[in-house]
Amino acid sequence: FKATVTDYLQQVGKLGFEFMSLLAESLHLPQDVFDKFYKALNERSQHQCKIVKYPVVDPSRGNQGVGPHYDSSFLTL
């Protein structure tokens, strides 16, 4: 399990950096415009993973998952 999750996190981390370069390009900015904010941090890894078992939702109550929350990072995949 640990090896699978570690591999997944490495792949998602690479995807995140690739996506940021595409986002920059879509804004007509240099592809590496975000590097100064995130590349140096990449060595310390800003990627986070939280494995959550969502509770069963009662459709009549209209609630969802783990409730209201926010993601504190730049990009959530």
Image: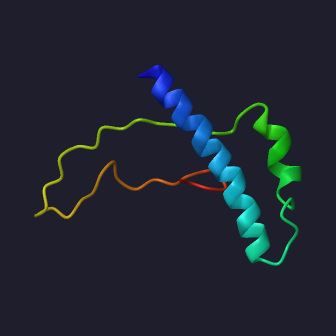
Residue at 13%, 55% (x, y): give it. Answer: 58
Residue 73 seen by the camera: no
| Way the structure is coloured | rainbow
Classify residue 4 as left or right of residue 9: left
Residue 51 seen by the camera: yes
Query: Percent x, y for residue 47?
Result: 63, 39
Query: Of 6 and 56, which appears nearest the observer?
Result: 6
In this picture, is 7 found above or below 36? above
Query: Percent x, y for residue 41?
Result: 80, 39
Query: Of 12 and 48, which appears nearest the observer?
Result: 12
Residue at 85%, 73% (x, y): give it. Answer: 29
In this picture, is 37 found above or below 46? below
Query: Percent x, y for residue 33?
Result: 87, 62
In this picture, is 58 found above or below 7? below
Residue farthest to the top, as pictured: 2
Classify residue 6 as left or right of residue 34: left
Residue farthest to the left, as pictured: 60
Classify residue 54 as left or right of residue 20: left
Which quadrant of the structure image shows residue 14?
top right
Residue at 51%, 54% (x, y): give it. Answer: 70
Query: Of 20 and 7, which appears nearest the observer?
Result: 7
Query: Of 27 and 65, which appears nearest the observer?
Result: 27
Which quadrant of the structure image shows residue 64?
bottom left
- Of the 4 image quadrants, the one containing the N terminus is top left
Classify residue 54 as left or right of residue 72: left
Residue at 45%, 53% (x, y): give it. Answer: 69
Query: Percent x, y for residue 11?
Result: 59, 41
